[in-house]
């Protein structure tokens, strides 16, 4: 019906499920290791733990982004948020899965929701629309709970904390280490960039050009903006190894990270007052309890 505008506000259901099952099925099939899947969730959870845009914008509101932003680059995506209904949706569905598993002692899970909600009728290839109440009803059919409040709080409300509840329910916690997790490591090696989101608050591409500046982060406060090219670190030509060494040296609490930068044909030296060392997010097993991720990632048939 082309007379009726599409409603995208529930993309956190469809695409959030897509992002969730991407990782779960990759682990179940053996296409990705458990380490890699947990590393990707760590990367997403870590970013959401420092994302300033959470204060004013809900996940559901980001479903409008493909329309209002047309997927064009923006100056400070950490402040404006982008299409977080994918990755934060994935973490929300992880929490829902863990809630169901723990309440039913693994008798039920999000597999049951997906089977009922997406399964449809055999041989019926027609469209099947849904609304918020349909999602709530399908979840309640799997396990009775106040799913309306659960979804409203996590997807339709701004000012939420980082979505780590599902990770914690699985028996893990978000921690910070001085070396990248497997997902960030491979991603940086593939693109030849340096993701310093959680230290200097920026990503530097293979040509030394800064991007993804974190709003009110160290680079932001040093007036570094997207498109700034980093030419030298402490007077020596830029490389990923040199800037990481400078960040480690600055952890002494006194030494700034000194950079020679260029933008628009203008050169200047900046000193970034950051002293907390290199930081990348990881998921770490918490305590001696069961590892609920093992159940989630268990294949449904031998592989």
Image (cartoon, helix red, strand yellow):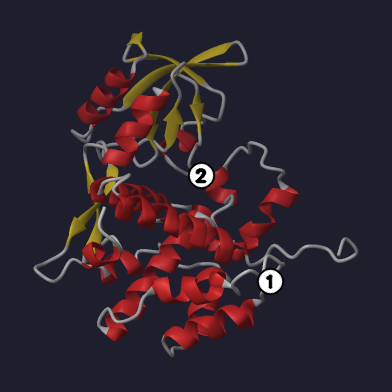
Residue found at the very far front of the displayed protein: 123
Q: Residues within 10 Å of mark 1 (few under 14, many from 20)?
A: few
Question: Which one is in front, 69 or 251?
Answer: 69
State the residue at coordinates (44%, 42%): 217
Question: Which one is in front, 48 or 121?
Answer: 121
Q: Position of residue 281 (x, y in %)?
A: 29, 47
User: Quarter of the image holding residue 300?
Assistant: bottom left
Q: Residues within 10 Å of mark 2 (few under 14, many from 20)?
A: many
CA gap between label 2 and label 1 equals 41 Å
State the residue at coordinates (25%, 58%): 302
> Mark 2 near mark 1, Cβ–Cβ under 8 Å?
no
Q: Is residue 295 left or right of residue 226?
A: left
Q: Is residue 284 left or right of residue 200?
A: left
State the residue at coordinates (43%, 53%): 22
Rendered position, 265 above or below 42: above
Q: Position of residue 211 (x, y in %)?
A: 51, 31
Q: Is residue 201 left or right of residue 175?
A: right
Q: Position of residue 169 (x, y in %)?
A: 27, 71
Rendered position, 233 above or below 53: above
Question: Which one is in front, 162 or 296?
Answer: 296
Q: Which residue is labeled 1 in the image?
A: 128
User: Quarter of the image holding residue 292?
Assistant: bottom left
Q: Position of residue 271 (x, y in %)?
A: 38, 25
């Amino acid at each position: 019906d082309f007379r009726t505008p599409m409603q995208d506000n529930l993309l956190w259901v469809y695409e959030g499920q897509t992002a969730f099952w991407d990782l779960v099925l990759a682990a179940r099939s053996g296409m990705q290791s458990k380490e890699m899947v947990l590393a990707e969730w760590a990367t997403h959870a870590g970013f959401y733990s420092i994302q300033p845009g959470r204060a004013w914008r809900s996940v559901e509101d980001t479903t409008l982004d493909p329309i209002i932003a047309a997927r064009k680059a923006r100056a400070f995506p950490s402040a404006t948020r982008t299409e977080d209904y994918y990755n934060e949706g994935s973490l929300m569905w992880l929490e829902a899965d863990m809630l169901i598993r723990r309440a039913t002692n693994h008798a039920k899970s999000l597999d049951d929701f997906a089977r009922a909600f997406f399964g449809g009728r055999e041989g019926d290839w027609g469209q099947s629309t849904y609304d918020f109440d349909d999602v709530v009803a399908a979840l309640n059919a799997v396990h009775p709970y106040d799913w309306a409040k659960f979804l409203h709080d996590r997807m339709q409300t701004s000012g939420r904390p980082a979505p780590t509840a599902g990770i914690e329910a699985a028996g893990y916690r978000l921690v910070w280490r001085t070396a990248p997790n497997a997902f960030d490591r491979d991603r940086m090696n593939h693109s030849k960039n340096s993701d310093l989101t959680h230290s200097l608050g920026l990503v530097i591409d293979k040509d030394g050009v800064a991007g993804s500046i974190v709003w009110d982060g160290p680079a932001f406060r040093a007036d570094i903006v997207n498109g700034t090219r980093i030419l030298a670190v402490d007077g020596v030509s830029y490389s990923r190894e040199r800037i990481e060494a400078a960040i480690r040296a600055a952890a002494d609490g006194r030494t700034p990270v000194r950079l020679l930068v260029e933008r628009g044909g203008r050169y200047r030296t900046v000193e970034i007052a950051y002293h907390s060392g290199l930081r990348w997010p990881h998921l770490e097993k918490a305590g001696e309890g069961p590892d609920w991720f093992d159940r989630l990632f268990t294949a449904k048939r031998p592989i």
